[in-house]
Image: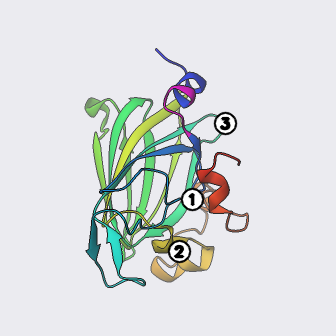
Amino acid sequence: MIDAKDLITALALVPHPEGGYFREIFRSGAEPMSSKGLTDPAGALMTTDREPPPRNVLTSIYWMVDRRSPIGFWCSNASDHVHYFHAGAALTYHIIHPDGRLETQRLGPDPRRGDVLQLVVRGGCWKAAHLEEGDYCLLGEAVAPGFDFRDLRWATEDDLAAVAPGLLAGRADLRGLLRTEARPDLDAYYEGKR
């Protein structure tokens, strides 16, 4: 079985600002990675209620976490995401729905253990993920309307408390998935300079 470092090299993955590593492999009608996580006006577009309104119809990435970067930090996106398990160990997702309900799912290889092979995270939910066992988890992620960093919000403790009061009380595991550093320079990630 291929190890995490070899997989990062083979798939040309670069660090992702949510944590882990990624490579955009599809952006409807446009060259992947070239728009650096923003809508590419040269691609296939759809109109949304966002600012600015156009978004690429669909985007897809490889995303991987490993022992060096085992967390996907709490964030929310306006678009629906479908996560597809590809290889490695299971990844545990925590999703806070707009009604305050916490859902925990394992995206992984073994349905007999309760793993799911696909996981839908609806737009407007807060999500975070972490690797509990194994060396890495590789997944695919399709986003529609297509991913645009202007649709992404990093969670603060106050954001999560506003939706799910008391959820973080006594939950160091969930609190530890909050991003503590400032919003990153996104261009640096897309250029592989992070």
Mark 1 residue type = Leu
Magenta-span inclusion, residue 11: yes
- Which mark, by number, is residue 160? 2
Q: Earlier in the sequence, mark 3 or mark 1?
A: 3
Graded by Cα atoms within 10 Å as few (under 14), some (14 to 19) or many (20 or more), the crowding at tag 1 reads: some
- How far across and how far down the image is residue 146, in percent? 35, 63
Above or below for 62 versus 88: below
Point out residue 19 in the picture as x, y percentages from the top left corner. 59, 50
Magenta segment boundaries in residue numbering: 9-13
| Residue 141 is at least partly visible in this image | yes
In front of the other: label 3 or label 1? 3
Instruction: Residue 3: say if magenta.
Output: no
Q: Position of residue 188 (x, y in %)?
A: 67, 55
Q: Secondary structure at mark 3?
A: loop
Judged from the image, the secondary structure of the residue bearing numbered disc 2 is helix
- Which residue is rendered at x = 68% and y = 63% of the image? 184
* Label 2 neighbour load within 10 Å: few <14, some 14-19, many 20+: many
Label 2 – label 1 distance at C-alpha = 10 Å
- The kind of residue on which mark 3 rests is Arg
- Which residue lies under the disc numbered 1? 174
State yes or no: discs 2 and 1 in contact (Cβ < 8 Å). Answer: yes
Alpha carbon separation for disc pair 2 and 3: 26 Å
The residues tagged by marks 3 and 1 sit, at their Cα atoms, a distance apart of: 19 Å
Residue highlighted by disc 3: 68
